[in-house]
């Protein structure tokens, strides 16, 4: 488990380094490897968040798919909120809904809650057991099943494979 946490944290830190420096020069990559190695040794092995990630081809494919789904949902919700701001006649029916998740992993639930919060128009308020409480700008249905379908399912199917 410690080796898994170390390996994943090292790869994450290196990816962040490469994105921040946006350089593929050998010297920059070498510095990134050394810095990522040191940080992973100091902090990564204790980071439980990296221990719950599954290391499999299926999980990596789902992570890539999840990224695209999240970006698409982010674009859609941004357009929806922008239209509501620009056109005040569009209905706003705010409220708090209770949704259910099948995710067992604490990290998976956290990622789900953050994904919901990052899409405009929704805000995760609380997580209790398998339930999330979400403030929704336009409550379409207060029914647990319908609200779960609308808010959670699009993210959950990918996160289940990534986190279990």
Image (spheres, rainbow, N blue to C red):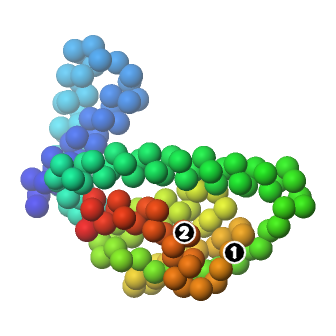
* Label at residue 34: none
Where residue 58 appears, as percent x and y from the top left, is 21, 53
What element does badge 2 sit on? helix
Query: The N terminus lies in which quarter of the figure?
Result: bottom left
| Crowd around label 1: few <14 · some 14–19 · many ≥20 (10 Å) | some
Residue 112 visible in image: no
Residue drawn 54% across the image and 68% down it: 151
Where residue 45 appears, as percent x and y from the top left, is 17, 55
| Crowd around label 2: few <14 · some 14–19 · many ≥20 (10 Å) | some
Where residue 137 appears, as percent x and y from the top left, is 71, 68
Residue drawn 57% across the image and 77% down it: 147
Give the image quarter of residue 163.
bottom left
First in sequence: mark 2 vs mark 1: 1
Outermost residue toward the right?
89
Asked whether, in this view, residue 20 is left or right of residue 26, the answer is right
What element does badge 1 sit on? loop
Give the image quarter of residue 128.
bottom left
Where residue 153 appears, as percent x and y from the top left, is 45, 68
Asked whether, in this view, residue 75 is left or right of residue 132, the answer is right
Asked whether, in this view, residue 83 is left or right of residue 161, the answer is right
* Label at residue 151: 2
Q: Is residue 63 above or below residue 103?
A: above
Q: Is residue 153 above or below residue 50?
A: below
Give the spatial CA distance, label 2 vs label 1. 10 Å
Q: Which residue is mark 1?
A: 139
Asked whether, in this view, residue 97 is left or right of residue 103, the answer is right
Residue drawn 22% across the image and 15% down it: 26
């Amino acid at each position: 488990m410690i080796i898994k946490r170390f390996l994943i944290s090292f790869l994450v830190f290196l990816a962040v380094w490469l994105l921040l420096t946006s350089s593929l020069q050998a010297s920059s990559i070498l510095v990134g490897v050394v810095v990522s190695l040191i940080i992973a040794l100091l902090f990564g092995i204790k980071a439980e968040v990296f221990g719950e990630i599954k290391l499999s081809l299926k999980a990596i494919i789902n992570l890539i798919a999840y990224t695209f789904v999240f970006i698409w949902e982010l674009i859609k919700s941004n357009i929806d909120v922008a239209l509501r701001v620009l056109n005040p006649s569009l209905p706003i029916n705010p409220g708090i809904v209770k949704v259910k998740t099948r995710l067992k992993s604490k990290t998976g639930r956290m990622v789900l809650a953050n994904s919901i919060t990052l899409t405009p128009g929704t805000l995760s308020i609380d997580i209790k057991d398998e339930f999330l409480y979400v403030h929704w700008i336009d409550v379409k249905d207060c029914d647990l099943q319908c609200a779960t379908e609308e808010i959670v399912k699009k993210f959950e199917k990918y996160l289940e494979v990534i986190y279990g």
